[in-house]
Amino acid sequence: MAHQNLADPKRNEYTLPAGLPVLDELSSEQLRKAQLLHEGLTAALTARFSALLRQPIRVWLEKLERDDSVGCLTRIEEDSTLAVLTAGSQLRAAIFFGNSVLLSVIERMLGGTAGEHTSARPLTAVEVKLLEKLLVKVMPEFQVCWERAISDPVVLDEIHAKPEMATVFGSDEDLMTMACRIQLGFCESDMRIVLPVRSIVKMLDSGSGGQTASNHQEMDPVKQQIRETLLRSDVDVEVILSGNSLPLAALAKIKPGSLLVLDSKVDRQAEAVFNQSVRKKGQVLRDGTKRLFRIQDEKPSS
């Protein structure tokens, strides 16, 4: 239930009750839209991160909170890393990651086995560079989510391995935090997306006026934006041609140039695996220099 903490008016927590009164700049309807909008963003980040790492990773929104420039630096208890996003002079946002998950993500990027619980520690300069390469690839998801409030592209401006040393927002600026969680395997930690309240008001109100009776039944703009974000998300696809089994002793002798015998011809039935779960049978074809996969069945199996 949404409530205002009277002991600490800067630390308000919002959810989605019925009939929530106007609190500061945000009405109950705006809070609903803000939550829906950023639930769509976390769903898109889940799909994009999973595709980039080739391993399931989950991001989800837990609650919305009012914050200030000091408080947003102290909400994550473990060592954390701060990424600053900008869109020209129109928007400035902060994303805080708990380092236990980031270290596991970086381990995966380096080809290791990720997902085990990792103790948090500050990132090294090399690890920050690797994180930068990953985050640059997910900027389009933030662009789609926030596009109503901006005209310039969202870019990764800087990364701070010591967030407490950074100055992102003005000392008197009202902020809204999307308190999220991020999970990779058995490792889970906080992820917090911080935006000025004025930016959220702009992205929610932009284009919302002037609705006529003729388009009243159209999809809610926020839901439409969430749908478009999900449809833009990448899905991993693998085509399995064939397989076989071999003794462990034979596996130990494998070297460059070794040949493996498959249990069927490569031009016979194969299988496509979408996002490591949905499977469809079909056939691999050739069209000039391209190799194609023709789906034969209609019902996916998982």
Image (cartoon, rainbow, N blue to C red):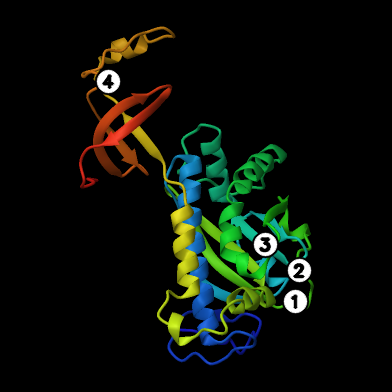
Q: Which-is-in-front pick, marks 1 and 4? A: 4
Q: Quadrant of the N terminus?
A: bottom left
- Helix, strand or loop at mark 2: loop
Q: Identify which residue is drawn at 59% across, 53% down.
A: 140
- In the picture provided, is 191 more to the left or to the right than 271? right
Which mark sits nearer the N-terminus, 3 or 1?
Answer: 3
Identify residue type, mark 1.
Answer: Glu
**Residue highlighted by disc 2:** 169
**Residue highlighted by disc 3:** 94
Q: CA distance from mark 3 to mark 2?
A: 9 Å
Q: CA distance from mark 2 to mark 4?
A: 58 Å
Q: Residue 252 shows which numbered tag?
A: none
- Helix, strand or loop at mark 3: strand
Which mark sits nearer the N-terminus, 3 or 2?
Answer: 3
- In the picture provided, is 296 more to the left or to the right than 152? left
Which mark sits nearer the N-terminus, 1 or 4?
Answer: 1
Q: Is residue 60 visible?
A: no
Identify residue type, mark 3.
Answer: Ala
**Residue highlighted by disc 4:** 266
Which mark sits nearer the N-terminus, 4 or 3?
Answer: 3
Q: CA distance from mark 4 to mark 3?
A: 50 Å
Q: Residue 173 shows which numbered tag?
A: 1
Evaluate if marks 4 and 3 touch, with contact meaning CB atoms under 8 Å apart. Answer: no
Residue 29 coordinates in the image, percent (x, y)? 51, 84
Q: Identify which residue is drawn at 25% across, 14% down.
A: 247
Residue positioned most to the front: 214
- Helix, strand or loop at mark 4: loop
Evaluate if marks 3 and 2 touch, with contact meaning CB atoms under 8 Å apart. Answer: yes
Which mark sits nearer the N-terminus, 2 or 4?
Answer: 2
